[in-house]
Image (cartoon, grey):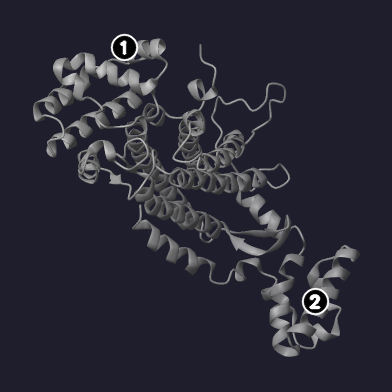
Amino acid sequence: MAVHPIEYRYGTAEMKQVWSEETRLEKLLSVESALARAEADVELIPAGAAAVIAEKVHVVLLDRVNEIEDEIQHDMMALVLAISEQCGDAGKWVHFGATSSDILDTATALQMRDAISIQRVKLCGLLGTLVEQADAHKETVCAGRTHGQIGVPTTYGLRFAIWACEIDRHITRLDELTPRVVVGKIGGAVGTQASFGKNGTTIQKNTMKYLGIGSVEVANQIVQRDRYAEFVMWMANTVTTLDKICTAVRNLQRSEIAEIAEGFGKKQVGSSTMPHKRNPIKSEQVCGLARIVRAMVEPELMNNTLWDERDLTNSSCERIVFPEACVLTDHLINLTTKVISGLQFYPENIRRSLDLLSGLNMAESVMIVLAEHVGRQEAHSIIRECSIAAHEGGTSLKNALLKRDEVTAHLGADEIDVALDPYSYIGTAVEQVDAVVARLRTRV
């Protein structure tokens, strides 16, 4: 019986597989095999025993491991016994000198490597989608807003370019943190490697070489959790960007704005009672589930404050944090990509927003032109008074401007019209987008 929505509602099969019981077992067995090979390299265990272990790990069954764990109440020892019973005389060399966390944490590194690889590909896909929208809408002039109020114009292309650059930074951060996160350790009970004699450093190095991952410089019984906390915080940071993007979509889809909207299927239902509804449900899901991913940050930070060389308070917590955060982050990247690629634009409503304030949103443009004649501070004062007069008098800014001698002494009606044209006041927005698109297209 499925209980958690991740089991039946959220997430991709690809990412769920990374954190499945079956994959976890596969990674643990890979580490035990690599450890045996590394120990044989320095003649700590017989080469023949290492070969048997490497062969027999492939026939160990999850059901058998779980059966043993039910009896002995120790997950790692259950794995060791399940391998050993397949190996005959070589079974006595399984897990030689190792502590549970040597295997568990190194297996976690293998899972994180796979999770990061999936996330990176998906993020590059989202980046490409944002870049294409930026290029397509670099000249789509729209109302800029600050504090929820209409301001001077911007372009949709610039918005997409800003989001694309943010996603690009997340990809860079992921690349930077990966070598710190994808590391294993073979250190024994408290990290001294005493159980491996004088060959502990070589065994650790060779084990990780066989697994294709990095190795810690030093550790106690566990890999230090600042590494994992960095990854979880990266996921929280990334989904917050997705939250921001989808919050913008939700706001711009409001009925009274309606400049853009999520794609809506022909058979899609918006409401069980209001047939006309076209709700931004994908964006809302992104914003809602981003809260869950962010909530994973504090537990993983606290998992770094363990007693002495370690305790077990991190273990049960991480069984939830890692799969939830990774599955949901992957899910939200997918959802956001669908939202952005399927956006619908309503040019008439975009224009309506630009004209909504009867020119008041172009007050800065007029001020800049007038400032060439009377100075910036005086121009600001004059245009501010004209804006108030237009607002309170229910008239356009142009009408208010034409009634002020301080304005008409320097600006004619034609010059005022040019200054009030929103399509002529987007500065270098197009050039900025072109530069971003040119750079990021090489990224994706």
Front-most of 194 and 30? 194
Looking at the rendered structure, the kind of residue marked 1 is: Arg
Disc 1 packing (10 Å; few <14; some 14–19; many ≥20): some
Mark yes or no: residue 373 visible: yes
Q: Which mark is residue 293?
A: none
User: Distance from label 2 to label 1 (Cα)?
Assistant: 80 Å
The local crowd at label 2, few if under 14, some if 14 to 19, many if 20 or more residues have their Cα within 10 Å, is many
Q: Nearer the viewer, residue 203 or 169?
A: 203
Q: Is residue 158 above or below residue 323?
A: below
x 70%, y 48%: residue: 257
List the single residue furthest toward the left.
48
Residue farthest toward the right in the current orientation of the protein: 393
Vertical comparison of 204 with 268: above or below: below
Find residue 383 and name its label. Answer: 2
- Exactly how many numbered labels are in the figure? 2
Question: Residue drawn at (37%, 48%), measured in percent from left and top?
Answer: 178
Q: Are marks 2 and 1 in contact (CB under 8 Å)?
A: no
Residue at 69% x, 25% y is: 275
Mark 2 or 1, nearer chain start: 1
- Quick one: SS at disc 2? helix
- Residue 141 x %, y %: 59, 60
Q: Is residue 51 left or right of residue 305?
A: left
Relative to 54, is 424 on the left or the right? right
Q: Quadrant of residue 22?
A: top left
Toward the viewer: 28 or 367?
Answer: 28
Q: Nearer the viewer, mark 2 or mark 1?
A: 1
* Quadrant of residue 420 within the rendered picture: bottom right
Q: Which residue is mark 1?
A: 64
> Residue 212, position in %: x, y?
24, 42
SS of the residue under disc 1: helix
Residue type, numbered disc 2:
Ile
